[in-house]
């Protein structure tokens, strides 16, 4: 930009503190004066219409570059529209809302209707918007405060899956309907060793999810370094508080993306196909818990897994820890 060509004295453009759009218009004027004041050539060079260029050329003054700024005051009508509602009705709306900031425009409309005053909710909302003291700022403050307590949904790095024992434990929940009764199966699996643990509950909430995490930490013979869950409400509140107390990072999957918890999903399928579907009657929660215990023993101690070279998960954990020189006592 050669802005010095059109300025009466040598001065830096940045001293005027112009906006980006104003600097762009100044570039038009600079190019216009530097090329023989050819307006059509300037319009073709910058790809603007002649009407736009002449509009700003008429406003431009080399002694005041602020003339290239868009002044919204010039677009304001000289006479603004006024509300046609009678002032005493507006005053009544003001008083009702001021006495109770929690009243909505619909409640105020109904209250005035019972007094024989017909006024629309849109008019009431305009009155509220025009007076800052009528806005329910306490409600907004509570909403913002609750938003500050939201859990950060951090995603686990893919390298954590096969990094080490306990580097990432995938946890998921399965709803079972048996003879009209509903059960909730919580499952956990170590991505490295495929060591799994399942347990049943009658309800699905954060209290039971936290209890399940305690059982998982007691069952696994190694330290849990991180857990990965979906975005269900059972994995918030008490469950997340427990992960913070245990200093265990809590990762979340993307919404509607079960493949990010694929090994937990596969564990659920194995539980269904090999232990649940062929059972004739499982009427009580204790029976379901007993089946879960049998599955834990079979899955971890007897079932061979192709992903870990046809070893059982416990054999894999034992061999892995022995290679590291760690005594494994299970």
Image (tube, rainbow, N blue to C red):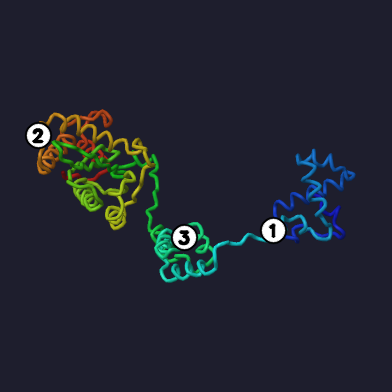
Asked if marks 2 and 3 touch (Cβ < 8 Å), the reply is no
Q: Tell which circle, 2 or 1, labels the residue nearer the N-terminal end.
A: 1
Nearer the camera: disc 2 or disc 1: 1
- What residue is pinned by disc 2? 281
| Place of residue 117 in the rendered image (x, y in percent of width and height, measured from the top left) | 45, 63
Q: Nearer the viewer, residue 25 or 222?
A: 25
Q: Which residue is mark 1?
A: 77
Q: CA distance from mark 2 to mark 3?
A: 65 Å
Give the distance between the C-alpha atoms of the residues marked 2 and 1, in whole angstroms.
Answer: 79 Å
Question: For residue 118, which numbered disc appears in the image?
Answer: 3
- Of the image marks 1 and 3, the number of the one nearer the N terminus: 1
Mark 2 and mark 3 lie on one chain; the one further toward the N terminus is 3
How far from the left and from the top, in percent, is residue 156?
A: 38, 44
Few, some or many residues within 10 Å of mark 1 (<14, 14–19, 20+): few
- 204 or 217: nearer the viewer: 204
User: Given contact means CB atoms under 8 Å apart, are the residues at marks 1 and 3 in contact?
Assistant: no
Looking at the image, residue 109 lies above or below residue 269: below
Please state which of residues 39 and 159 is positioned toward the viewer in this rendering: 39
């Amino acid at each position: 930009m050669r802005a010095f060509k059109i300025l009466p004295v040598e001065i830096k453009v940045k001293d005027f503190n112009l906006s980006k759009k104003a600097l762009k218009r100044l570039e038009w004027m600079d190019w216009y004066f530097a090329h023989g004041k050819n307006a059509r050539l300037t319009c073709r060079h910058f790809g603007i219409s002649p009407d736009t260029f002449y509009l700003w050329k008429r406003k431009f003054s080399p002694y005041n570059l602020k003339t290239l700024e868009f002044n919204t005051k010039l677009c304001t009508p000289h006479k603004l529209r006024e509300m046609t509602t009678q002032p005493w009705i507006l005053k009544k709306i003001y008083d009702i809302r001021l006495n109770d900031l929690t009243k909505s425009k619909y409640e105020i409309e109904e209250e005035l209707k019972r007094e024989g005053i017909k006024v629309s909710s849109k008019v009431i909302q305009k009155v509220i918007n025009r007076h800052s003291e009528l806005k329910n700022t306490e409600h907004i403050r509570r909403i913002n405060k609750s938003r500050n307590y939201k859990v950060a949904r951090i995603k686990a790095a893919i390298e954590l899956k096969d990094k080490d024992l306990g580097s990432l434990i995938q946890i998921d929940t399965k709803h079972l309907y048996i003879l009209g009764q509903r059960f909730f199966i919580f499952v956990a699996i170590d991505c490295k060793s495929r060591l799994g643990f399942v347990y049943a509950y009658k309800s699905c909430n954060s209290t039971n999810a936290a209890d399940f995490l305690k059982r998982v930490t007691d069952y696994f013979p190694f330290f849990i370094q991180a857990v990965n869950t979906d975005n269900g409400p059972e994995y918030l509140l008490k469950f997340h508080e427990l992960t913070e107390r245990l200093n265990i990072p809590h990762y979340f999957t993307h919404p509607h993306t079960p493949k990010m918890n694929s090994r937990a999903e596969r564990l659920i399928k194995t539980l269904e196909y090999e232990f649940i579907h062929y059972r004739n009657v499982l009427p009580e929660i204790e029976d379901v818990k007993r089946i879960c215990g049998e599955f834990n023993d079979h899955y971890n101690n007897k079932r061979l897994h192709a992903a870990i070279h046809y070893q059982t998960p416990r054999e894999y954990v034992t061999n892995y820890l022995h290679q590291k020189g760690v005594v494994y006592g299970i």
